[in-house]
Amino acid sequence: MEYENKLVLAPMVRVGTLPFRLLAADYGADITYAEEIIDHKIIKCERIVNDYIRSTDFVEKGTDNVVFRTCNEEKARVVFQMGTSDAVRALKAAQLVCKDVAAVDINMGCPKSFSVSGGMGAALLTKPDLIHDVGASYYWKNPLISLPDTVELARRIEKTGVSALAVHGRQVAERPRDPAKWNEIADVVSALTIPVIANGDVFEYDDIQRIKVATGASSVMVARGALWNVSIFSPNVKAHWEDVKKEYVRKSILWDNDVKSTKHTLKEMIMHYSCLEFPEGKAIIKSQNLVDLAKVYGDEEYYESVRANRIALDRHA
């Protein structure tokens, strides 16, 4: 995978599932991250080709729980992000998925307690030797620590042979309300020879060029800006969020997305522009399955057509 001059959909828990990734690509994202999946979880899965919806599923053994779903359409651009604290386990997990994805990413950015307490995410920032062990052949995403430490760590990561480094312009203790430090991303960029992907406070298409100029980064990663309206990746006029939302619902139906993930993503979109206390929000909260969500958006006919098409394909298989 090439990392120069790319637009990248950031990894987002319960958001970065197959329908959202494909929608981001439709609007111009060159690289699309899946949500972070813990190495322990993926190595408990078996790879299953799902002829019913034409996807490749990694399903937890002994259950119907789809941990990771992808398809041939995104094979050249999807990045599998892994949470890990162990080099051997990370390799085992990567080997399981590597033939179905474009790249594997190791998360060093998550500051949440469940991740840090397990020695993953931002906890890795304090373990450079472990980073070196895990690092070969992967692609890293990490936040800032103190600037000198960040630059030195970035240099050590580069020496492991990684293809690129994504840098989020906030320190571990900082939160989205704190402004991203683009100037400090620039210091990391100037210290490395591999492509650096800048991340932080990109909310409009024009911000993509602004952060590239400010940091010198090769590429740009977008999180909340894409969650709120994934057409941010398009150089054309931004689509209305209501239209984007309906497109997402249709893709969720088409790819049989987990209803909890679909509801979470829709609620995040709505809360940015409106309120969940209005009828639409209440209807989403009450929805139990994709049929219910189709009814909320007047897409019952589309749902039935997708279902009928699957049945027909199954009969001819």
Image (cartoon, grey):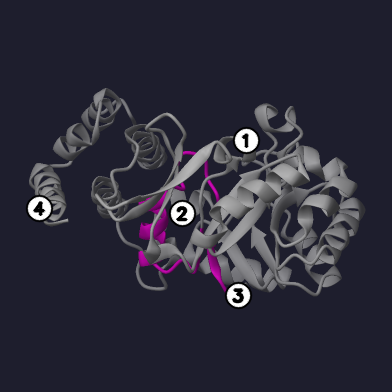
Badge 4 marks a residue whose secondary structure is helix
Determine crowd level at label 3: few under 14, some 14-19, many 20+ residues with C-alpha closer than 10 A. few
Q: Position of residue 163 (x, y in %)?
A: 71, 68
Q: Is 5 one of the magenta-colored residues?
A: yes
Q: Which residue is mark 4?
A: 312
Q: Amino acid at mark 3?
A: Glu
Viewer-closest of 69 and 50: 50
Secondary structure, mark 2, is helix
Image marks 4 and 2: residues in contact by CB distance under 8 Å:
no
Q: Which mark is residue 2?
A: 3
Q: Earlier in the sequence, mark 2 or mark 3?
A: 3
Amino acid found under the numbered disc labelled 1: His
Q: Report whether 217 appears left or right of 146.
A: left
Circle nearer the N terminus (4, 2): 2
Q: Which residues are magenta?
A: 4-32
Quadrant of the image containing the N terminus = bottom right
Disc 2 residue type (three-letter): Ala
Q: Which residue is mark 1?
A: 40
- Mark 1 vs 3, N-terminal side: 3
Q: Is residue 249 left or right of residue 136?
A: left
Instruction: Residue 167: tell me if it is visible.
Output: no
Specify few, some or many for label 1: CA neighbours under 10 Å numbering under 14, 14-19, or 20 or more: some
x then y, percent, for residue 135:
77, 56
Seen in the picture, residue 208 relative to 116 is either above or below; the reply is: below
Assess whether residue 292 is covered by the magenta stretch.
no
Q: Residues within 10 Å of mark 2 (few under 14, many from 20)?
A: many
In the rendered view, tell whether residue 109 sits above or below residue 95: above
Q: Are marks 1 and 3 in contact (CB under 8 Å)?
A: no
